[in-house]
Image: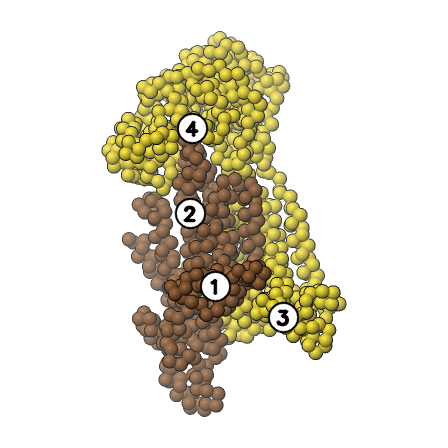
């Protein structure tokens, strides 16, 4: 019956809401704070009001000044046959002069009685079954899964018909029948919620602390499951009303007046006297809608994480005057993500310039905003509400302010991007060939066979053995390293002038990391591309890049050539990073230095230096005033009290003001 | 291969369990087909004789096994009520209409919901999305019989474009236009309920896929939005959707049944209701068996479709 699909979907939507898809973008310092419950809108209260009216009518039906629903208008002459709705009978009369208004009111009571009792009985049993099978799992879970499978395959209507034939059509039979039928739906929802909850840390913790399983079940899980179950109870209530209507429609309803029967009785007259069926149908629709609205409102009130997927890109402020010439010019770039928890300043006043053949490494721990700096250059934000300001110029083209068509053309023909994780960067359902050829065909007029020839050449270039065969493969048939070579080949498909590599080796085996880096650097030199290499691994930088910039809290805090940064770090964060790289010359078992504390939140950053809370040399000045960038373009830093000469490099540890639990900076060098 | 074998075993179990349970329930119901057949004034002896004739005096399991043997050869026994026709004859007459209704409804639902979900997912929270999502929410609150009445009133009574009742339906081959004209409202009613379901499901899967790395990278490669939607996003997002389409067939049968009553189509739904009311149990058992086989087969087809849609499943990598 129709109820089955609706349950499946609502169910599905409910479970889905538990995982927020866009969390990964906002996680840059934002995900910790939970947004406030979403307000319940006008529609929610309207719906709740309608339900309240129904309840009132159901309880006091006998006291209301309406006619006897069974009084035959034909005989009493009070209501005429098929009377139109009006003052005399607000809902009109039916084929024998029944007052439809009185009949609709009479139908309220059975609807609510069945709905409430089925929701209570079926819901409680279903919750118990779901809790048990979700928490204890094992055989019990398998058995209930098989039973649900069978129940789904069983034509529900036949069951209903057979049972009704055996036990009659009293209200008790219906309640029992619908209760049994609704158990699987509740069980499934509660089971899903239990499964996802019991995998979370706090249940393990509770168990480790000696709480018994049953107590965990009751104290920890029950409140967390109450909300989805309550939300579904309203929706389930609506489904019961639908089910009764469906049965009435095939002539198998209760032995009293119900809405379903009124609708069914009126359908034959739809051509001549539509009001007879339209009015009860609308009453039923409004009721179902109200219950759904209330259920949905409850769910989104307590689980507001679901949304936050607005897609909007904006650019603010004027560009800085173009200097022309360089491959990439980034000037005072600021990127703000507007999330439900507030505005996240993921990139904050970043400037640098790259010429053909330059290689700049951007280094920082996770959450420092380094990946966002790359993404801000090309505008790769998936679903997010983003504002950028400042200037990004590629080959003299203002990337923030040109028309979408032109932007696509510049992106496709001048820029190549190598992703962090080759396992998720290739479309799993398309062949390698299609994926390499696609950007060529999109941005150049090139025949398919020519594109294919170029693809083969590229694949040889990036070191893929047997490229002919590999072209026909799907991504999952290749190893991680091979896939990363493919993504590099795709990035090179249109001979870009600028290559953006976002931690290209983080997701790979240690043995492959070096190969891929060498490949990238070799290609960069051969093809004279400008390249940005984002990494958290300082050791990588030393071998390859010309210049390095250190990212912290969405800013670049220091930049210069490799030698000068390594030999003479000025910013204390840089210094700390350098001393956390394992040094092979130290004696074995000497302690690695780590940076205490965690990267700063990017929502409402403190007015002073971003590093001040973790900095051993911070003063009041550092906490209140942001340090300006020093002047020398080739070697600058942002610090009030830079490291001087050979001074001992300290790290924050004793003076850290933050809880040191989760954090050991990821920057501990080679994994 | 092992997986296929295991699935087959499981499906067979479901099939046997469902048909046996139906058999059991029908046996327990208070009506007595032998008495009905013998007529109102029949003596006890005549009824007993009839019962023996029908084989109803034998134990339940024995009769079930017998029935199963016949069912495999599409022999479901004669209709007890309609003299001279076998259960299979009756089914063969009504099945095409129900099938047409269901297929038309699925096609309409897919044709409406896929583009709509894509429009919604391109700009979540935008005007199109908000309108489509609240319409879907409203549709979910409309039981098929209420929706059918609304549609019949608007398109049939008010505008007069389509008939509100299916009357002497010509075959799809004989007069396709008239056939489709009559089947339009019933199919649309059934379809719109599905649209609500499909739109919600596909929209959220599309939005999820849109956040995948490979989609963001496709955008960075300067591909057009339309191309990204159709070539990169749709297929990886369609697994849940395919499941819903496939498994909905079971739900669709229930829906179709009510629609058939509403628009007076002589399909399987009407057949099964009439058979139950008239206690024509051979027909009921046959219909149930057929529905279950249909459901189980759809399950299988969905599994096959999976591997077409996702090469990882084809290669057993997932």
Q: Are marks 2 and 4 on the same chain?
A: no
Question: Label 4 crowding class (10 Å Cα cut-off): few <14, some 14-19, many 20+?
Answer: some
Q: CA distance from mark 4 to mark 3?
A: 68 Å
User: What chain letter is assigned to the residue under label 3?
Assistant: A
Q: Is residue A215 left or right of residue B63?
A: right
Residue B129: which numbered mark, if any? none
Q: Is residue B278 left or right of residue A316?
A: left
Query: x and y percent of residue A441 in the render?
Result: 35, 33
User: What chain letter is assigned to the residue under label 1?
Assistant: B
Q: Which residue is mark 2?
A: B238
Q: Is residue B16 visible?
A: yes
Cβ atoms at labels 3 and 2 below 8 Å apart: no
Identify the element where label 2 is drawn. Answer: loop
Q: Which residue is mark 1?
A: B182
Per the rendering, the colour in which chain B appears is brown
The tag earlier along the polypeptide, 2 or 1, is 1
User: What chain letter is assigned to the residue under label 4?
Assistant: A
Q: Which residue is mark 4?
A: A409
The tag earlier along the polypeptide, 4 or 3, is 3
Q: CA distance from mark 4 to mark 1?
A: 51 Å
Identify the element where label 4 is drawn. Answer: helix
Q: Residue at coordinates 49% horizontally, 47% vertically from top-left?
A: B116
Question: Label 2 crowding class (10 Å Cα cut-off): few <14, some 14-19, many 20+?
Answer: many
Query: x and y percent of residue B269 in the render?
Result: 46, 68
Q: Between label 2 and label 4, give the one nearer the viewer.
A: 4
Cβ atoms at labels 2 and 4 below 8 Å apart: no
Q: Between label 4 and label 3, give the one nearer the viewer.
A: 4
Task: Establish if A565 lies above or below A120.
Answer: above
Tell me the yellow chain. A
Q: Which residue is mark 3?
A: A257
Task: Establish if B225 lies above or below A650.
Answer: below
């Amino acid at each position: 019956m129709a109820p089955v699909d609706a349950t499946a979907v609502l169910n599905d939507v409910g479970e889905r809401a538990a995982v927020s898809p866009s969390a990964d973008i906002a996680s840059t310092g934002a995900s910790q704070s939970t947004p406030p419950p979403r307000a319940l809108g006008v529609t929610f209260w309207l719906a709740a009001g309608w339900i309240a009216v129904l309840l009132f009518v159901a309880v006091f039906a006998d006291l209301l000044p309406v006619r006897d629903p069974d009084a035959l208008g034909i005989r009493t002459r009070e209501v005429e046959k098929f009377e139109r709705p009006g003052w005399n009978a607000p809902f009109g009369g039916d084929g024998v002069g029944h007052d439809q208004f009185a009949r609709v009111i009479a139908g309220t009571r059975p609807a609510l009685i069945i709905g409430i009792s089925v929701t209570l009985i079926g819901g409680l049993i279903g919750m118990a079954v779901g809790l048990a099978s979700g928490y204890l799992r094992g055989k019990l879970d398998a058995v209930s899964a098989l039973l649900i499978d069978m129940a789904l395959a069983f034509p529900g209507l036949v069951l209903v018909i057979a049972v009704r034939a055996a036990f009659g059509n009293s209200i008790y039979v219906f309640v029992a029948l619908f209760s049994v039928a609704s158990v699987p739906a509740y069980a499934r929802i509660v089971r899903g919620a239990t499964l996802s909850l019991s995998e979370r840390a706090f249940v393990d913790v509770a168990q480790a602390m000696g709480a018994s399983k049953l107590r965990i079940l009751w104290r920890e899980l029950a409140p967390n499951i109450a909300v989805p179950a309550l939300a579904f109870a309203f929706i389930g209530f609506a489904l019961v009303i639908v089910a009764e209507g469906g049965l009435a429609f095939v002539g198998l309803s209760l032995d009293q007046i119900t809405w379903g029967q009124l609708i069914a009785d009126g359908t034959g007259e739809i051509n001549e006297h539509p009001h007879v069926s339209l009015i009860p149908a609308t009453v039923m629709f409004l009721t179902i809608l109200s219950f759904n609205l209330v259920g949905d409102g409850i769910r989104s009130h307590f689980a507001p994480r679901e949304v936050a997927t607005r897609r909007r890109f904006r650019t603010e402020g004027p560009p800085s005057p173009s200097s022309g010439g360089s491959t990439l010019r980034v000037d005072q770039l600021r990127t703000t993500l507007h999330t439900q928890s507030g505005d996240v300043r993921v990139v904050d006043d970043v400037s640098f310039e790259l010429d053909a053949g330059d290689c700049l490494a951007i280094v920082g721990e996770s959450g420092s905003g380094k990946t966002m700096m790359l993404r801000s250059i090309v505008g790769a934000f998936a679903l997010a509400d983003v504002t950028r300001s400042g200037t990004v110029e590629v080959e003299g083209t203002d990337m923030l302010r040109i028309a979408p068509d032109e932007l696509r053309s510049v992106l496709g023909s001048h820029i190549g991007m190598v992703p962090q994780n080759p396992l998720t960067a290739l479309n799993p359902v398309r062949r390698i060939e299609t994926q390499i050829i696609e950007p060529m065909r999109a941005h150049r007029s090139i025949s398919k066979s020519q594109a294919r020839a170029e693809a083969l050449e590229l694949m040889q270039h990036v070191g893929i053995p047997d490229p002919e065969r590999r072209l026909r493969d799907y991504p999952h048939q290749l190893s991680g390293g091979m896939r990363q070579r493919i993504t590099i080949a795709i990035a090179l498909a249109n001979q870009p002038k600028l290559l953006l590599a976002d931690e290209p080796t983080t997701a790979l085996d240690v043995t492959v990391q070096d190969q891929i880096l060498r490949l990238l650097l070799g290609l960069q030199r051969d093809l004279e591309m400008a390249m940005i290499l984002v990494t958290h691994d300082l050791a990588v930088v030393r071998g390859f890049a010309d210049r390095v910039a250190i990212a912290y809290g969405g800013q670049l805090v220091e930049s210069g050539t490799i030698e000068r940064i390594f030999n003479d770090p000025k910013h204390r964060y840089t210094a700390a990073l350098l001393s956390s790289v394992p040094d092979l010359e130290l004696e074995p078992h000497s302690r690695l230095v780590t940076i205490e504390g965690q990267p700063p939140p990017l929502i409402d950053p403190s007015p002073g230096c971003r590093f001040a809370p973790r900095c051993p040399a911070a003063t009041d000045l550092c906490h209140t005033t942001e340090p300006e960038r020093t002047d020398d373009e080739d070697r600058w830093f942002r610090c009030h009290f830079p490291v001087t000469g050979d001074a001992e490099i300290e790290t924050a540890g004793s003076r850290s003001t933050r809880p040191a639990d989760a954090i050991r900076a990821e920057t501990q060098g080679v994994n | 291969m092992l997986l296929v074998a295991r699935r087959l075993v499981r499906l067979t179990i479901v099939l046997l369990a469902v048909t046996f349970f139906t058999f059991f329930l029908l046996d327990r119901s208070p009506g007595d087909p032998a008495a009905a057949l013998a007529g109102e004034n029949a003596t006890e002896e005549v009824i007993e004789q009839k019962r023996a004739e029908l084989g109803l005096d034998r134990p339940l399991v024995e009769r079930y096994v017998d029935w199963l043997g016949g069912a495999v050869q599409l022999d479901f026994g004669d209709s007890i009520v309609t003299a001279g026709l076998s259960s299979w004859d009756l089914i063969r007459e009504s099945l095409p209409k129900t099938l047409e209704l269901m297929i038309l409804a699925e096609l309409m639902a897919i044709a409406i919901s896929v583009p709509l979900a894509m429009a919604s997912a391109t700009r979540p929270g935008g005007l199109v999305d908000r309108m489509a999502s609240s319409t879907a929410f409203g549709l979910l609150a409309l039981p098929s019989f209420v929706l059918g009445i609304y549609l019949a009133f608007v398109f049939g009574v008010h505008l007069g474009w389509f008939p509100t009742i299916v009357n002497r339906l010509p075959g799809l081959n004989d007069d396709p236009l008239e056939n489709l004209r009559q089947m339009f409202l019933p199919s649309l009613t059934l379809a719109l309920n599905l649209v609500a379901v499909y739109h919600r499901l596909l929209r959220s899967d599309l939005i999820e896929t849109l956040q995948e790395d490979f989609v963001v990278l496709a955008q960075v490669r300067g591909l057009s939005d339309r191309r990204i939607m159709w070539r990169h996003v749709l297929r990886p997002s369609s697994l849940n959707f395919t499941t819903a389409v496939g498994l909905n067939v079971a739900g669709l049968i229930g829906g179709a049944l009510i629609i058939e009553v509403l628009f007076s189509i002589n399909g399987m739904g009407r057949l099964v209701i009439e058979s139950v009311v008239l206690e024509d149990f051979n027909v009921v058992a046959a219909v149930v068996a057929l529905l279950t086989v249909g459901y189980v087969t759809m399950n299988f087809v969905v599994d096959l479709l999976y591997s077409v849609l996702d090469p990882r499943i084809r290669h057993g990598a997932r």
